[in-house]
Image (spheres, rainbow, N blue to C red):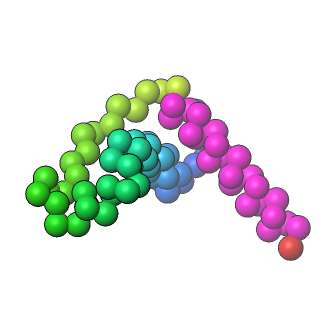
Amino acid sequence: AFPNQSIDFFGALRARIYDDCVRNFIADTGLEGLGSRLVNSREGPPKFEKPFMPVDKLLEYGNLLVEEQENVKRVQLAD
């Protein structure tokens, strides 16, 4: 689906999925309780399950990354 992309592209794609997990953790914990949940928590460090990566979500994030790449190229050409 994304020919001629480097391995970094696919690493960034995977990172987007994990970013969603972190955002969900923050939303569930709340900003007020985040510090106490992360520092010296009796529950220990947060554990994240391996996320499910549906193809449609991967394609969506992949297309967003391609758009970001094109924007970077466009800005560099303008300089």
Report the side of 15 relative to 59 (left or right).
left
Which x, y percent locates residue 46?
Answer: 22, 52
User: 37 above or below 22?
Assistant: below
Q: Which residues are magenta?
A: 57-78
Which x, y percent locates residue 5?
Answer: 58, 49
Residue under the point 59% across and 34% down: 60
Q: Front-most of 26 and 60?
A: 26
Residue under the point 13% across and 53% down: 43
Which x, y percent locates residue 55?
Answer: 48, 27
Note whether residue 40 is visible.
Answer: yes
- Inspect the magenta stretch and tell me whether residue 76 lies in it: yes
Which x, y percent locates residue 34?
Answer: 33, 57
Q: Front-most of 65 and 32?
A: 32
Residue under the point 66% across and 46% down: 66
Q: Residue furthest front?
A: 32
Q: Front-most of 77 and 54?
A: 54
Numbered circles on residues, count: 0
Q: Residue furthest right?
A: 78
Give the position of the C terminus as an image quadrant: bottom right
Q: Which is the main secondary structure of the residues drawn in magenta?
A: helix
Q: Quadrant of residue 1?
A: top right
Note whether residue 22 is visible.
Answer: no
User: 33 above or below 64?
Assistant: below
Report the side of 15 relative to 65 (left or right).
left
Residue under the point 16% across and 60% down: 41
Report the side of 23 relative to 70 (left or right).
left
User: 23 above or below 1?
Assistant: below
User: 47 above or below 51?
Assistant: below
Q: Residue furthest bottom?
A: 79
- Inspect the magenta stretch and tell me whether residue 9 lies in it: no
